[in-house]
Structures are given as C-alpha cells and as structure tokens.
Amino acid sequence: MSDANTLERNSAWRGEIRATFKLGWPLAAANLLQMLVHAVDVIFVARLGELELAAAALAIALFGLIMWAFSGLTGMVAALIAEELGQRRHSVREVRRSVRMGLWLAVVCGIAGMLVCLSGESLMRATGQDPAISTMAGRFLTIIMWAMVPMIIANVLRSFVSALGRPVFATAITASAIGVSALANYMLVFGHFGAPALGLDGSALASVLTASFIVLAYVIAIGTDRRLRRYRIFGNWWRPEWSRLRELVRLGTPVALTILAEAGLFSAAAFLMGRIGPVELAGHTIALQIAALAFQIPFGIGQAATIRVGYHYGAGDRDAVGRAGWVAIGMAMAFAAVSASAMVLWPMAMLGIYIDPYAPANAALVGFALQFLIVAAAFQFVDGLQAVAAGALRGVQDTRIPMLFAVFSYWVPGMGVSVLLGFYTPLAGVGVWLGLAAGLVVASILLLGRWMRRDRLNLDRHR
C-alpha cells in the first residue's frame, strides 16, 4: 500500500508539472514577447537621443504603472474562471458573467488612467524633473494614453483564453504585435513609406496602433475557436452582473494595489535617477528593460499558478492546491539561475539588444548600466519567488494580506534604502538599485511564509 501511495503521489506531481508547464510556457512567452513589443519602442526612441529616451522612460514609467495596476485588477478574472471550472457548476454561464464584468471594468479603469495621463507633465515637474524632458514626456503621454483602454481589454481577453486552455493564442497574438509595432515605429518615428517623421510622438502613436491590433486579434481568435466561441462572451454585453462585478473589484483591488506598490517602486526609481542625472537615467532605463525582460518568465509562471491553484481550489482539493503552488515556485527558481547567470556572464550582449554598447557615445551610459545589471542579477531569485508566491495566493483568492506585505516591503525598506543610499552615500544610482533589491527580498520572505502557512490559516479551504 505504501508503494502504491508513493507511486500515486509521484504521478500526481508529474501530472502537475506537465500541466503547469503546458500552461506556463505560452504565458511566459507571451509576457516575454510583450516586453519585446515595448523594446521595439525603446530601440527606435534610443536612436533619437538621450533626452528623448529619458522623456520616454519617464512617460512609460507613469503609463506602465497605471496600466499594470489596472491589468492586475481586471486580471483576477482568471482566478474566478479557474474556480468556476474547478467546481464544474454551470461553467459556461458563470465564465461569461465574469468575463463580461471584466470587460466593463477594463473600460472604466482605462478611462480613469487616461485622465491621469493628461496631468503627466505637471506630475513630472512636481517631482523635480528637467522642464524640457517633462514637456516631451507630457506630450508623449497625451498620445499613448489612447492605448490604455485597448491594453486593459486585451488583458481580460488574454485571461479568458488562458484559463480556458488556449494560452498559445496569447503567445501568437503578442508575437504578431512585434511586427506591427516595428513597422509602425519605422514608419512614424523616422517617416518611411510616405508617413510623416513624428519622432517621439510617432513612437507613442505606434503604441496605440499596436494595442488596437492586439484587441482585434483576440476578438478574431475567440470567434474562430470552437471551445471559446461557445461561451459567447460578447453576448448581452450591456447586461450588468453587479454581484460578479463587486466580487471582481473586491478580489482585484488588492492585486492592483500590490502591483502599484511594486511597479510604483520601480517607476519611482526612474524619477530618482532623473534627479541624479540624465545619463544615469538612460543607463537605468536600459538595465531595467533587461531585468524586466527576465522577470516576464516567472511572472508568466505566476499567472499559470493562479489558474492551476484556482482550479484545484474550486474543486476543493487541498493537496493539489499545494502541489500546484510548489511546482510553480520550483520552475521559477530554476529559471532565475539561468537569468542571473546570463546577466553576469554576458552583460554586453544583453545591452546590445537595445543599444550599441561599444559606441564611444554610449560609454558613460553603458558604464552605469553594467553596474545596475550586477544588482539585477543578484535579485533574480527573490524577484521570481515573490511573483510566483503572489500568483499562487491569488489562486486561493488571498489578496488583501499580500497587498499589505507588498506596500510595506516596497515602500518602507525598498524606497527607504533607495533614498538613503542613492542620495546620502557615494553609491548614487547603485544605491537606488540596492533599494529595489531590499524591497524584493522582504516581499519574497513574507509572501513565501504566508504560502507555507496556508493550511494553518485555512487559505486553501474553498469557501
């Protein structure tokens, strides 16, 4: 009997590994490709000059902060769908209700984000940024803000197709968007194919066109897939489901605040760098792009953990809930070893994705970026750990306490160390990055500890 139980347990673990990998790799690939979509913008803008790159960095820091927070709020629709599928109770109707309210919420959040973007230049000046850079950044925001609503809608549709077992759609659509972004930037930034040369404004407009393409691609994919089409998620789109909307807001708001706390720290770091100097800010932008590129893999694994844990949570299988979470954490740690090694062993090759690291004009920028990459390599493990632990906790619909952990971790030790070491020691920019690492370390310890205590806290018992 003991051998039979062991074989059964081993089979369950292998099955969970296969299921998580099958779901996680397309999501991770889609996240990675999404970063490459943004990287295309950086590649084109970087060729305009350091001031333009700095302005775009500040604008994207604010835009991205808003967009990712609202995407976290609406993205909790994936946990609700997974729970409904796990319970197997009228799943078609329940899933449709969740997605419909997710789309409603996406539009409302997107409009709110656009209103914030309209005050972009004032916010830049209030934080002490260079007036010329603030003006360019503010103009950039008044254009790219039109991408806010379609980006958040696309996030809801991505959550839907992923939870329904079609994550590869997200990968294919995002891969196609790279080509659209590159073509739009090529045309609008430098004025090719008869288009006007709009410079920095052209890159912002290219982002709007790319976001619109992504939404259209999801609509077409959902309409042509037999399994997805049967849910008729766009049917009766005007009909409210107030209880479902309240549930989504209740669960998603702490997630949005969690993302706001983390992304806010990294966005604030750009403003801190702007006060240190434009070259430091440019180096920070490139190094952060590389770190963010690496983060997309554990972030995708965390999204898979939310769905897998949520499915078992809905089914009431507490053992399977634990397996799903630990499998995802193990995968993230394995990847962290790879990404940290790459940053240490081949930093110039990684910088070469965005700029020519051997060009004399980039010497100062590269020098700063190399210093920041060493710190980024050191925090790969804790960054991946906190992302996946948070994803697993979202699967059991535990979002409020993790939010409090995030706010404390990123804004007390995180921002505190960044300001202290960045402005009151000779470390300057490196000190700011050490603060980022400190916030991630504390967050990973707190979130992992809560996941390990889930049984005692009854987090994995379905309500």
Image (cartoon, rainbow, N blue to C red):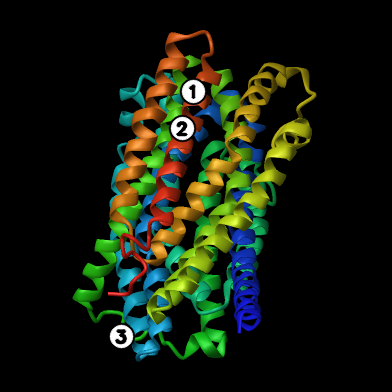
Tell me the distance, in whole angstroms, between the alpha carbons under discs 2 and 3: 40 Å
* Residue 75 in sight in this render: no
Residue 94 found in image quarter? bottom left
Q: Which residue is mark 2?
A: 58
Quadrant of image for the C terminus: bottom left
* Residue 372 x/y as whole percent: 61, 26
Name the amino acid, label 3. Answer: Asn
In the image: residue 62, left or right of residue 224: left
Q: Which residue is mark 3?
A: 236
The N terminus lies in which quarter of the figure? bottom right
User: Which quadrant of the figure has residue 374?
Assistant: top right
Tell me the crowding category of disc 3: few under 14, some 14 to 19, or many 20 or more residues within 10 angstroms, Cα based: few
Instruction: List x then y, in percent, for residue 343.
Output: 71, 35
Question: Mark 1 or mark 2, which is nearer the start of the sequence?
Answer: 2
* Whole-number angstrom distance, CA of label 1 to CA of label 3: 50 Å
> In the current view of this chain or complex, which residue is farthest to the left?
242
Residue in the image at 51% along x and 55% along y:
388
- On screen, residue 83 versus residue 341, left or right, reads left
Query: Label 1 is placed on what type of residue?
Result: Val
Which element carries disc 2, helix, strand or loop?
Answer: helix
Amino acid type, residue under disc 2 in the picture: Leu
- Of the numbered discs 2 and 3, the one sitting upstream in the chain is 2
Residue assigned mark 1: 432
Q: 11 or 295: which is nearer to us?
A: 11
